[in-house]
Amino acid sequence: YYVYPPIAQTSMTRLDTPVHPMPFVEYPMRFGRYQLGESHRESLRRFHSFGALKRSKATALFVMGSCLSLPKAFQTGEGPAKGAAKQTTVRGSEPKETTLTGKASPSDKDTTSPNLSNKSTSRPKFVYNEHSRRFHNEENAVYPLSNDEDEISRLQEIHYFTRWILEGDFHAPVKDLLESGANVLDVGCGPGTWTLEMATNFTNSHFTGIDMSAIFPETIRPQNCTFQECNVLNGLSFPDNHFDFVYQRYLVSGYTSENWPYVLKEIKRVTKAGGWVELVEVDVTSRSAGSLLTELNNTMIDFMKAKNVDLKIGKKLPSLLEQCSDDPKSTLFADFRSTPINWGGRVGDITANQTRSAIGAVQSLFEPTYGKMTPEAFKEHIDKTLQEATDFKAYYNTHFGYVQVNKA
């Protein structure tokens, strides 16, 4: 197992045991017998040997975060703290370039969502592409990736991958608060893997997960965990000063440049004074890349740039966190980890698999660059690109940070 610190890529730490144990959890069997989906098993076999599922009359063993009970529309395919940091800390270095940049926080004058007038109640919830991949159909959302079962498996895999490379589920100094009892919001929760895991680990706290696609469990979940279908671009349906801790990650492709200030203002609004906000975002720019990977990257970056989406937003994380507090300097922390693409052991293997899965779902976006291709030919091209990444020792950066919310 390898963990890649934010230093030169030749420096890495080998671990004889995983950073975290296998994410199994045992629950009382209150809702009958359920079988873990094969695709969900497969996403976790890449980390550990799955082993046999052991069952009894009283309990069921399953992987935390798997959607054991999906919404009917999904099943059928139908669609209608303590210890605040004393100073600002921005850490991390890498070869050849500086990655932490960003402009100052915008003015707080405009608090109105630019998307409220676009909300529609007559559109079908889901649409399908020519390869039978399912996508959201939110009128005001730019998020390009799918929301079907394959995507759920990818999101579950990236949860454990993220916990692995960042060495934990969170970094804000809120552990004592969570153990004593806190109100926590997970923005863009997807299948709810982080939310469910945190609710299991901190039973005195309450966790709410929200997402515009209801792909989270609707029945089997811890009693201190709830989910809501909610598009944050239309505003958060919570009162002011409601949450002690707000967590959001991997929405780099979900918000336009105009969306980000509004979303962060909403997060600040619903967070209590003295509460904490934590963000995790990737900078999709591949470093030390060859021509094939550079072309793949630039195609996606240019496509989303035309929609006013900045896929390099991760390196601007400090400026995003600054917008969540009226006095961020004393508690703001930001850092990043560099992860290999298709080299360096299991971490690189999973990064490659994430690339295949995410890019494969949006093949049509690459037709202006590659032309019309069969899925098989497209997959072959992606495999060649990933082999090039191995040869060039390519990598990308995942940024994370937190800030305590102060309100003037």
Image: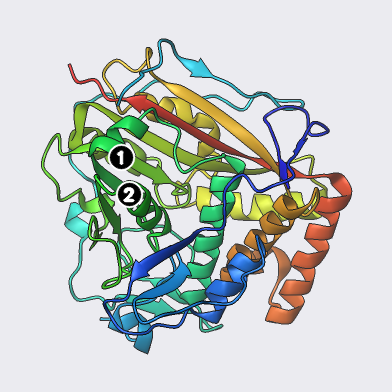
The foreground one among 20 and 278 is 20
The mark nearer the N terminus, 1 or 2, is: 2
Amino acid of disc 1: Val
- For label 1, the SS is strand
Snapshot colouring: rainbow
Q: Residue at x 36, y 25 (%)?
A: 403
- For label 2, the SS is strand
Rendering quarter of residue 337? top right
Which disc number belongs to residue 187?
2
Q: Is residue 133 above or below residue 7?
A: below
Query: In the picture provided, is 128 more to the left or to the right than 360?
Result: left
Question: Which residue is outermost to the bottom?
Answer: 76
Q: Are marks 1 and 2 in contact (CB under 8 Å)?
A: yes
Q: Residue at x 42, y 59 (%)?
A: 193
Query: In the picture provided, is 249 more to the left or to the right than 7?
Result: left
Q: Is residue 15 above or below residue 26?
A: above
Query: In the picture provided, is 342 more to the left or to the right than 152?
Result: right
The foreground one among 408 and 142 is 408
Q: CA distance from mark 1 to mark 2?
A: 7 Å
Query: Which x, y percent locates residue 211?
Result: 31, 59
Whether residue 136 is visible to the viewer of this picture, yes or no, is yes
Whether residue 364 is visible to the viewer of this picture, yes or no, is no
Mark 1 packing: few (<14 Cα in 10 Å), some, or many (20+)? many
Amino acid of disc 2: Val
Query: In the picture provided, is 83 more to the left or to the right than 97?
Result: left
Query: Which x, y percent locates residue 391?
Result: 89, 50
Q: Residue at x 43, y 10 (%)?
A: 87
Mark 2 packing: few (<14 Cα in 10 Å), some, or many (20+)? many
Query: Which x, y percent locates residue 77?
Result: 38, 86
Which disc number belongs to residue 246?
1
